[in-house]
């Protein structure tokens, strides 16, 4: 992944943590890479006039010899148009996984729930 993409993802993560980007859980059909299966929810956020979607998926992978098949997962971050068509997909990177976890915390209001539980 190029440095500029990493900086963009870092900025999205920072803005998400600071609450400057609101992410919502959405329900839509998407075509997943590698004949994957959606694992969890699709989240959508808007920033600088662009719509972003992020989701986690699982898929079958093979060892380097093609002998052993196993399940693995990845997180995908995409820029989508008004019809939910992909305009751009970011290359896979651990920073996208970090963003996904922060998006989930924010969209599902997990910190609010934890604070409410602990206040009793």
Image: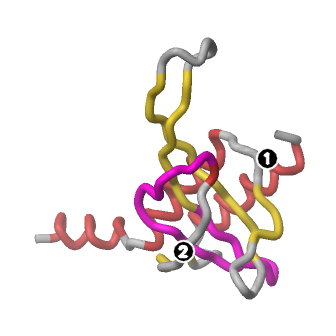
Look at the image and give the residue range highlighted in magenta: 34-54
Up-down relation of residue 63 to residue 31 (above or below): above
Residue 18 in the figure: left or right of residue 57: right
Which residue does the numbered mark 1 point to in the structure image? 6
Up-down relation of residue 53 to residue 51 (above or below): above
| Residue lying at 59% horizontally and 55% vertically, measured from the top left | 99
User: Which is nearer the eye, 29 or 42?
Assistant: 29
Residue 58 belongs to magenta span: no
User: Which is nearer the eye, 117 or 41?
Assistant: 41
User: Which is nearer the eye, 81 or 112?
Assistant: 81
Farthest front residue in view: 67
Q: CA distance from mark 1 to mark 2?
A: 28 Å
| Residue lying at 80% horizontally and 57% vertically, measured from the top left | 8
Do residues under tags 1 and 2 come within 8 Å of each other at their CB atoms?
A: no
Which residue does the numbered mark 2 point to in the structure image? 29
Residue 101 picture location, percent across and down? 49, 54
């Amino acid at each position: 992944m190029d440095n500029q993409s990493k900086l963009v993802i870092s900025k999205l993560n920072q803005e998400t943590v600071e609450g400057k980007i609101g992410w919502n859980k959405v329900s839509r059909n998407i075509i997943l890479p590698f004949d994957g299966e959606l694992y969890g929810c699709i989240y959508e956020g808007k920033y600088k006039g662009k719509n972003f979607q992020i989701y986690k998926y699982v898929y079958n992978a093979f060892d380097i010899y093609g002998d052993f098949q196993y399940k693995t997962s990845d997180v995908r971050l995409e820029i989508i148009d008004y019809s939910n068509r992909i305009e751009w997909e970011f290359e896979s990177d651990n920073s996208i996984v970090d963003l996904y976890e922060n998006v989930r915390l924010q969209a599902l209001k997990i910190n609010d729930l934890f604070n409410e539980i602990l206040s009793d």
